[in-house]
Amino acid sequence: MNRENSTNVVELLNLKMYFPITRGLLRRKVGEIKAVDDVSFTIKKNETLGLVGESGCGKTTTGWCILRLYKPTAGKIIFNGRDISSMKENQLRPFRSRMGAIFQDPYGSLNPRQTARTIVGMPIIIHGMKTKGYDDRVEELFKLVGLDPSMMTRVPHEFSGGQRQRLGIARALACQPELIICDEPVSALDVSIQAQIINLLEDLQEKLGLTYLFIAHDLSVVQHISNRVAVMYLGRIIEIANSKELYANPLHPYTKALLSAIPVPNPVIERKRTRIVLKGEVPSPADPPPGCPFHPRCNVAIDDCKTEKPQLKDVGNGHMVACFRV
Amino acid sequence: MTNNANNNPQPVDIAKWSETAPRYSETKRMISVFIGRPLPVIGLVIIVLLILVAIFAPLLAPYPPNQMDIPNKLQQPSSEHWLGTDSLGRDTLSRIIYGSRTSLIIGISVMAISSITGTVLGLVAAYFGGAIYHIIMRFMDALMAFPMLLLALLVASLLGAGMLNIIIALGIGMIAAPCRLMCGVVMSVKQNDYVLSARAMGMSNLRLMFQEILPNAFPPLLVMITISIGAVILAEAGLSFLGIGITPPTATWGGMVNDGYKFITTHPVLAISPGVAIMLIVFGFNMLGDGLRDALDPKLRGVI
Amino acid sequence: MSLLSIENLKTYFHTYRGLVKAVDGVSFNVDEKEIVGLVGESGCGKSVSMLSVLQLISSPPGEIVGGKVMFEGQDLLKYRSKSNMMNSIRGAKIAMIFQEPMTSLNPVLTIGRQLTESMEVHLKMTPQMARERAVELLRLVGIPDAKRRLDAYPHQFSGGMRQRMMIGIALSCNPKILIADEPTTAVDVTTQAQLLELMRDMVDRFNTALIIVTHNLGVVARYAERIYVMYSGRIVESGLADEIFLEPRHPYTIGLLKCVPQLGETRQERRLEPIKGLPPNLINMPPNCAFLPRCNYAIDRCNLEPWPSLKHVGGRHYVACFREILEKS
């Protein structure tokens, strides 16, 4: 696949999302949580970018900024050539129909009081595209995600977890978006169902030419579905590389620890693996350590790491890493 | 796959198992939970009977409620006056039958006013948050701190006694509870991913509030309204008992208890029978509310 | 003789929609100091079977309808849930760590109190002795400045430390068996690695047997010596870790191993092979093998006969399937 000259669907430039911490009656600002701190990346058309990291690392916040559920503190979100980072709601409307979102919780992401037909067709209704082809379109969406259209009149609790996630996917596809933000779409599902949904997402991407931002904490799932993977830690991207490259040649000490922490379902391989057990816990994003955010837990940290923030640097072949020791 | 598996794969009859989650009706489940317990059903029966009594009062009452018959005042129960007559010779049974109208009208209209206003205020407060939330909720705190009796006295002295004024006084006094409940429920409902997802689609605030959030916040409110109707009826009876409620000669149960209790030693039925009626209707609404709470409990939904 | 042996355990739930056979004839044994994995997807009855061992099933709707739980020569199911016998077993001889360690600590009691309480009750220790041991335990689970921390409340600790304390509390009475019910489902992978390593070191130090109940195949591959695979209330395959992962014989186990993405594997290299269909609805199940509708290996016999029982296929490997499938990985 030649992606060199394909267009960027999304480009993030130094995105920052700080949440104020307020205290007292007058809601005095006493600090801020740097949920996303200077994140830049691009996603090309028809590509899947995986975003991994542990809870609180800012991966979901990044996704929600692109969806403009948040208004970023600083930085640019260029979607389809336009900066949407500070647009007002009415300006955003046409862009909203070009983006879809799939959420983690298949139980919480569907309104329990609406029928499957209403849920799937909702984006079409909201964007005023409800024409006489509407019923056919909804039926087509059901078939597209592998659901029987005869189930359209059911309400969410009558579907299983995997089927609900299919409904969520159908809804995300309703307005024929280019970009889909998948926020932990399979983490709440049983393993035997996870594979069905991953395959469905992969097939839909090929069929419809979709672009995905795939946010998840499970590195093996992310690596499987993504072309490139970005690893986040405390609001910053610390490494970004081609999926295979990241596995075969991880450079950042955190990525190495993350990879080694994932147990592989094969006892023979497991016995041979070296395990890096990280010390301590992730620091609070309200009070991130100075310098490299990972340095207090890093086993190769040097003095520079404690004072200066390493920037992402290209080490060849699009592999970027933010570490002084590389 | 090994050769073993491909040897002779047999078709499997999977018709016995459904490929999908089984279809079952939520409404059916709710009804079965509701009727599965005796007390809510008794409550429902009491309330349905009382509503029928209120509607068909003119047909059921043996005498007009305000027809005085001074020569026959303060009669003990007899075949002519099943529950006797009061100090003005009015038939107690007829007055109790007509009194059900007053109680139900007040109970329902007060809760209609307070729950609609409270719901909208609570929804707006919780949805927008920030300053709007603080203004609305502090106002509700003030309202809650204000004794209902005092409020009713205030309204009565400003507007005079009477059914409409009682409804206004109690209606205002009851806003805080549904507003606070709604606020709390909406706070949690709005965290749901489906609200987020609708926002990501660009749904307008009004639609988000009334289409996505409100229907999901409604069940606990319904339970509260039902139970509160009982409380309102009791409050009205209390006000009427104190003489600041509905003006005579309209038949109200509270007023009847007030009239009757002067004769409690000689004619106990005068005070006790409207008292029992009050007890029954309040009990009925409380039991109905309890039953609704169990039937609408989301924790019981989808339990295999 | 094994330390704990469960024979033909059956736990049913009487629900509004019908009878749910959550655990339907599970047999299971654990030797001293052994690390056993119990794997299965949600709703397969893995947690319920462990809760049944300790009689922590809420009844109604749950009911243990049959079977034996042999522990130290006694059938625990002969005793009532609230009997002195069960109280002296729970926590003291068989300890359990739950899925939500954050809510398992009482927020109004100090850590010291929660640690020493069971030691004073079960081990008849004096408060002084219990306190000394509590300090030692906290030190072992890696909590710095343990002596001072004893008087702190749970909210004063970070999430990771609270989970470490849960492990400390569970092991405070030197139990014979530690049951960890989805111990790491709610935590991140690097924390998961920390906790599992700690748990393994601790059971090793205390000579405790460990039962890891999880849906994560990787976790059992890494830590368990022997594995039980559950599906729909029954054990479908059991054996040593190598037997299960390298020579899986039950179609469900085979399917599970094929449907998870391998670390480092991309979609260009291999498309995942999901298990078709959905896990069965446990209400009013037919007597046939519950995996039948999803099975790629099914034969006529599966339709005609009730669920096959476990049969020995070599080593310590048992499988409940009519077919002789051998899949080498």
Image (cartoon, rainbow, N blue to C red):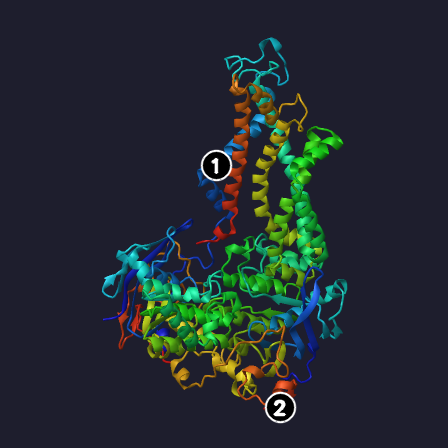
Residue A79 visible from this viewpoint: no
Drawn side of residue B14 relative to residue A109, left or right: left
- Label 1 sits on residue: B41
Please determine whether, in this image, residue A27 is positioned above or below residue A305: above
Q: Residue at x 43, y 64 (%)?
A: C113
Please determine whether, in this image, residue B32 is positioned above or below residue C58: above
Question: Three-letter amino acid code at disc 1?
Answer: Val
Local packing at callout 1 (Cα closer than 10 Å; few below 14, some 14-19, many 20+) is: some
- Which chain is mark 1 on? B
The answer to which image quadrant residue C7 occupies is bottom left
Please determine whether, in this image, residue A59 is positioned above or below residue A254: above
Residue that lies at the very extreme toward the front in this rendered image: C128
Whether callout 1 and callout 2 share a subunit is answered no
Res A315 label? 2
Query: The C terminus of chain A appears in which quarter of the rendering?
Result: bottom right
Q: Residue at x 48, y 62 (%)?
A: C103
Query: The N terminus of chain A appears in which quarter of the rendering?
Result: bottom right
The answer to which image quadrant residue A264 occupies is bottom left
Question: Three-letter amino acid code at disc 2?
Answer: Val
Residue B294 % position (x, y): 49, 45
Residue A3 % position (x, y): 65, 83
Res A154 label? none
* Disc 1 + disc 2, Cβ < 8 Å: no
Asked whether A113 or A119 is in front, the reply is: A113
- Cα separation, mark 1 vs mark 2, equals 74 Å
Residue C41 % position (x, y): 42, 66
The answer to which image quadrant residue A322 occupies is bottom right
Residue A171 % position (x, y): 61, 62
Q: Element under label 2?
A: loop
Asked whether C143 or B22 is in front, the reply is: C143
Q: Residue at x 68, y 65 (%)?
A: A22
